[in-house]
Image (cartoon, rainbow, N blue to C red):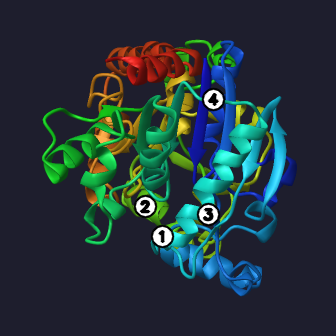
Amino acid sequence: MKILVLSSVYRDDSLGKTDTSTNVVNLFVKEWDKQGHKVLVIHNSHCYPMIIHKIPEKFKKILASKMGFEISDYEAVKEKIFLDDGVKVFRLPIKKFIPHCKPSNNVIERQINKIVDILKAENFKPDVITGHWASPQMEIISKLKLKYNCRTAVVLHGLGYMESSGYMVEEYLKNIDLLGARSLFQSNCLKKMLKLEQLPFVCYSGIPDEYIESYKLNTEKYNNINTWKIAYVGRLVSYKNIDATIRALSEIKDINWEFNIVGEGAQYSYLEKLARSLNCIDRIHFYGHVSRNEVMQILKDTHVFVMISTDEIFGLVYLEAMAASCLTVASRNGGVDGIIVDKQNGFLCTEGDAGELKSILERIMNEDETSLKLIAAKGNETVKEYSDCKVAERYLYKILEE
């Protein structure tokens, strides 16, 4: 089967740390390729005036801290053709003046013409076209459907464009066979917002099979705990609400704990100052960027993994923490709400709510070992249903479903 993938975000691993993009779409592409499908990727990168991409790193970090996302280096958005594990990727920049603005109709038409020319040159007539993020994927795919008469889908990673008066969602959906969301909460919001008869399907991410195989169920770490090991792994940006975790832990005085923060980002200095001001800096360790093996070892030793982000679409690290037998605390109504069932295979907390998080952590720390082991084991078992292979198969099956 020939699958055409359009995405606003697609990581180019050859750029190393220069490309800060998530690899969520890369993982679906690689899995479909492994399953024997012919896949071609169009990366509709958002390209701003050069001066924005060339902002000094110091100011980029300030903007990232305020806006919750990072402005890509120009090398990660300029036009390019490259191979991603043998899959051909065409990066076609979408010219925009400022982040989140809608591209002009002329820009969209030029992009469509380029895609049609590429497909003709590659002798690639798609059986399926699927897109990630709303703009410009919805506009482009709705028009490509008319030309190629194939199955089409779009998976939304947020609700922003759905609320824009200038964005003709209902018109685009006429030529899109399947609408997807990245969380159950987002799916319910879309159904209500767009007055849909059915819930959009939830397109969960998977966890690499090798990750699942690398972690073995280990509930013995909950025996006779002297110091509770809490961890966070990810970028240090405002919407991750790492400060709420520091505030919550600082209020727990009579139980020994340590908080291991793994990752880099714009909020490092702020978080360090906050920990000092709350007199808990000696119990908090900033690891910065570490290797894959080091992340695995940290999670294996961790008792509780916490990430109560605001508007967290999906975080692979939640699944990895569950695979590592961690008691995982995630955001209620976030990307893994539905995968994590509160107090059964993990815990759910209101995003950024330090008070509620404190209560959850105290409850965990005072719970009996048998109950904690049961929750950790259920979390570990849950992850096995969300391997890259299984979620990619379910995703494609859903698109092909009449």
User: Residue 347's mark?
Assistant: none
Reply above or below: 83 against 282: above
Q: Which residue is mark 3?
A: 110
Residue at 43% across, 61% down: 250
Mark 3–mark 4 Cα distance, whole angstroms, equals 19 Å
Report the amino acid beneath label 4: Lys
Report the amino acid beneath label 1: Asn
Q: Earlier in the sequence, mark 3 or mark 4?
A: 3
User: Residue 125's mark?
Assistant: 4
Asked which secondary structure carries label 4, the reply is loop
Q: Earlier in the sequence, mark 1 or mark 2?
A: 1
Where does residue 35 sit, x and y in percent of width and height?
66, 13
Packing grade of label 2 (10 A; few <14, some 14-19, many >=20) is: some
Mark 1–mark 4 Cα distance, whole angstroms, equals 25 Å
In this rendering, position of residue 329 left or right of residue 137: left
Where does residue 168 sit, x and y in percent of width and height?
30, 61
Where does residue 253 sit, x and y in percent of width and height?
39, 55
